[in-house]
Image (cartoon, helix red, strand yellow):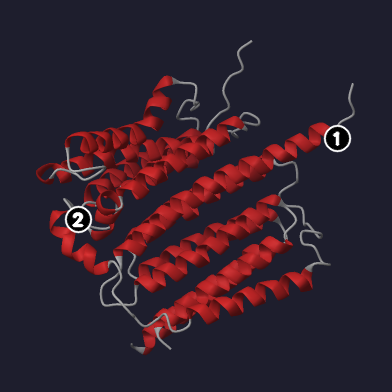
Amino acid sequence: MALTDWVFDGVLGLLVVVLAVAVLYARTLYASIVLFIAFGLLLAVVWARLGAADLALAEAAIGAGLTGALLLAALAQTSTTPFAEQRSAHWTRQRWPATGLALLVGVLLVRSLVGLDRMAEPGLMDAVTQNMADAGVGHPVTAVLLNFRAWDTLLELVVLLLALLGVRQLATKPLVIAAPWALLEAWSRILAPLAVLVGGYLLWRGSNYPGGAFQSGALLAAAAVVLRLNHLLPPVRWSSWGVRILVLLGVAVFLTVAIFTHWLGAGWLNYPLPFNGLLILLIEIAATVSIATTLTLLVVGEPDEVRA
Amino acid sequence: MTPVMFWLGIGIVLFVLGLHGVLLARQAIRRIIAINIMGSGVFLVMVALAARGEARDPVLHALVVTGLVVAVSATAFALRLATAAQAGDKKASEPKA
């Protein structure tokens, strides 16, 4: 490995750690959140560096973008003034026991992970490469997500749905959106169509290259959030039927395919051979729409109107 | 030291830092951020392990993609719980008319 690679890795690793410390011990909560968004973007660079392009895309859109938006929205809803310095933000009396415990866990982790950097056995990788011909898609990560381990992805969509239902039950107060800034509004009119275009491209390309339903859904959600924050989109509510159908579409299509493959085919989510690519694409499109709508609702969803 | 070992180490450092933050932070939002940093450490360990061989392990990558989406779902729910709890506290402390 060349020296420049080491310098790059070293600087990147150091920056990630320094940013994590800054996030955790920043004086104001606002600074902490902004630094966390920067941390997420840097982590996306780390994923790209480690050869995980799918993850880099997902982290930049979901980890940094949407989590950051969620945190800022939550901060706006709490009563503490965001810029005030919180002197008592950390417990001081518990400092030493907590540090000791964290260090102990760290030592145990180092002990268990040391030596794992050498490949002992190929694990499941060989099984994936052997079965790629029958997967229906050309990209191994997409094949694992939507064919070999499709059950996990189905349950993941259910988790997303459950989170949305939980958030909806606890609806606190209506979202207050400040008057849009003229430049931001103009930009969002350009950005949103571009995001839709890139989202569609990522979804289509996901069958053979990095990309796929989650990255695409997150990008579409980001476009919807930007439009909503600029008053270019009407309020999104769970109570409207269109929104409900879009949210449930992913799980519904996935379950229908699962039930039909169980009933007529080889078994639960074992796609029949000539149609596997088509079925995966169908599931991916439905999942993208659902993920986009669910994430949008999580960030800018309005509480239901109370019927008098 | 191999690059994989280096990134494994960074993953452990992130996990430990996050744990320290969870134990010491007083505000709910700070704790949620700290848990997210712990999660990033776990993801980093998994992605580093996926990069051991010549080819990248797609199973681990797929697991981390799933993990990211589950993490953002849990974060959204936790944040809403935190803000709702705070609103509830405020309501409870107001004098009853």
Quadrant including the C terminus of chain A: top right
Residue B82 picture quarter: top right
Look at the numbered discs 2 and 1 and tell me whether their residues touch, using CB distance below 8 Å: no
> Which residue occupies the foreground of this view, A181 or A55?
A55
Horizontal arrangement in the rendering, residue A249 relative to residue A236 (left or right): left
Subunit bearing disc 1: B
Subunit bearing disc 2: A
- Which residue in the structure is indicated by mark 2? A208
Estimate the spatial distance between the alpha carbons at disc 2 and disc 1, rounded to whole Å: 57 Å
Residue A102 picture quarter: bottom right
Farthest residue toward the top?
A: A308
**Residue B72, numbered label:** none
Farthest residue toward the left?
A: A274
What crowding class fits label 1: few (fewer than 14 Cα within 10 Å), some (14-19), or many (20 or more)? few
Residue B20 in the image, given as x and y percentages of width and height: 67, 67
Secondary element at image label 1: helix
- At x 28% / y 56%, what residue is drawn? A144
- Which residue in the structure is indicated by mark 1? B93
- At x 71% / y 49%, what residue is drawn? A82
Horizontal arrangement in the rendering, residue A146 relative to residue A44 (left or right): left
What crowding class fits label 2: few (fewer than 14 Cα within 10 Å), some (14-19), or many (20 or more)? some
Q: In this view of the protein, can residue A187 be seen by the observer?
A: no
Horizontal arrangement in the rendering, residue B72 relative to residue A137 (left or right): right
> Which residue occupies the foreground of this view, A181 or B89?
B89
